[in-house]
Amino acid sequence: MTKKITLLLVIFLIWGCGYQPIYLKKNNSVQKIKTITLSGDQKINKIIINSLGLKEDRNLLTGYSLILKSLKRIDIISKDKNGNPSAYKTFITVDISRAEKETIIKQKEFVSSFTYNATDNKFNFSQYQKNIELNLINEISEKIFIYLRS
């Protein structure tokens, strides 16, 4: 009996406090963006902009500018006895800045990395690297979404 009452109270508290999932309204969650400036790896920038649903509206009188700088780096972590790479680490770094009237208000750097071993089949290895890159970009995109919401 006390478990039912406790469960009922928890449900009412969550329902009454205005709890709302973060991803409920993904496209309408960001304030108005006047301009979006992209630099660095254009592929990464396009994937992030599309996944967040960001659109610029140059006709706005008020709003902020979003500056996105991205970088992809693949490092060789270890080599075998012949000198061939045997392990890699892919880093994706995205700097995001929010500016109003040429003044930067917020700035944050998002970094994501993954370590993996090399394979003999070059085609499968390149496909694996592309898959890792997309996963890292999606991870950063989720972090940016939460950052822009707060």
Image (spheres, rainbow, N blue to C red):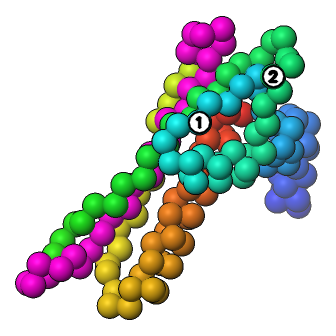
82 to the left or right of 132 = left
Tell me the quarter of the image containing the C terminus.
Answer: top right
Considering every residue shown, the one lying at the far bottom of the view is 121
Q: Position of residue 80 (x, y in %)?
A: 14, 82
User: Residue 36 at what x, y percent from top left?
Assistant: 68, 30
- Residue drawn at 65 percent across, 49 percent down: 46
Q: Quarter holding the N terminus?
A: bottom right
Amino acid residing under circle 1: Leu
Magenta stretch contains residue 122: no
Question: Is residue 104 placed above or below 114 in the rendered structure?
Answer: above
**Residue identified by numbered label 1:** 38
Amino acid tagged 2: Arg
Residue 84 horizontal/vertical position (percent): 18, 80
| Residue that numbered label 2 is attached to | 58
Q: Is residue 133 left or right of residue 65?
A: left
**Disc 2 crowd, CA 10 A, few/some/many (<14, 14-19, 20+):** some
Q: Could you say whether the residue bearing mark 2 is in a helix, strand or loop?
A: loop
Report the magenta residues as a range: 80-105
Q: Residue at x 18, y 71 (%)?
A: 78
- Residue 104, image quadrant: top right
> 141 or 4: which is nearer to us?
141
